[in-house]
Image (cartoon, rainbow, N blue to C red):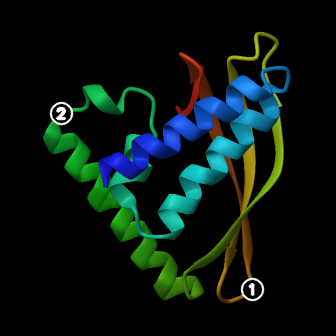
Amino acid sequence: MRKAFYILLALAAVLAACSSRHPEEQAAKAAKQYYDLLLKGRYEAFVDGRQGSGAMRPEYRSQMIDNMKMFAEQMKAEHQGMRDVRIVNCIADDSGRSANAFLAICFGDSTIEEVVVPMVEHDGQWRMR
């Protein structure tokens, strides 16, 4: 499972290198990829997409994973689950190293919720803050 996550991060780094002039696009795509992992039930990979996740204590990481599972279960009960994630917008700061990605979460009951995902670029990779 971790191998797939690292492949995803490597792909994100390649994409970032190819379009380094557009940090908004890079950050938005990375945020969408992380939320697609959440949608697919890959909670560990989603948590690993956070900045500093490698330094998390194992207990805290486990709690974060459990929280993501509970969130997904709650969304199933309230909105028939998450069905799709779409990029709405992204605004980067002047340095191009941090951004706010705006995503639309589409649910099974036809409701849509917009979320803001703070992103930070570190060593060529966009991660959730």
Q: Residue 18 bears which disc, if any?
A: none
The image quadrant of residue 28 is top right
On the image, the x and y values in percent for residue 84 come to 68, 72
Q: Is residue 71 left or right of residue 8?
A: left
On the image, the x and y values in percent for residue 30 come to 63, 42
Indicate the quadrant containing the N terminus: top left, top right, bottom left or bottom right.
bottom left
Q: How many numbered circles does the render carry?
A: 2
Given the current orientation, which residue lies at the most extreme top position? 95
Q: Residue at x 71, y 45 (%)?
A: 29
Indicate the amino acid at tag 2: Arg
Q: Residue at x 73, y 34 (%)?
A: 26
Q: Residue at x 54, y 82 (%)?
A: 81
Quick check: 122 above or below 66? above
Sequence-wise first label, 2 or 1 = 2
Indicate the amino acid at tag 1: Ser
Q: Is residue 67 left or right of residue 17?
A: left
Residue density around tag 1, few if under 14, some if 14–19, many if 20 or more, within 10 Å: few
On the image, the x and y values in percent for residue 43 come to 37, 59
Residue topped by disc 1:
110
Residue density around tag 2, few if under 14, some if 14–19, many if 20 or more, within 10 Å: few
Q: Is residue 5 left or right of residue 67?
A: right
The Cα atoms of the two marked residues, 2 and 1, are separated by: 38 Å
Q: At numbered mark 1, what does the secondary structure look like: helix, strand or loop?
A: loop
Given the current orientation, which residue lies at the most extreme left position? 59
Q: Residue at x 57, y 56 (%)?
A: 35
Q: At numbered mark 2, what does the secondary structure look like: helix, strand or loop?
A: loop
Q: Is residue 126 left or right of residue 37?
A: right
Q: Residue 57 bears which disc, if any?
A: 2
On the image, the x and y values in percent for residue 51 come to 45, 29
Asked if disc 2 and disc 1 are in contact, CB closer than 8 Å, the reply is no
Quick check: 74 above or below 52? below
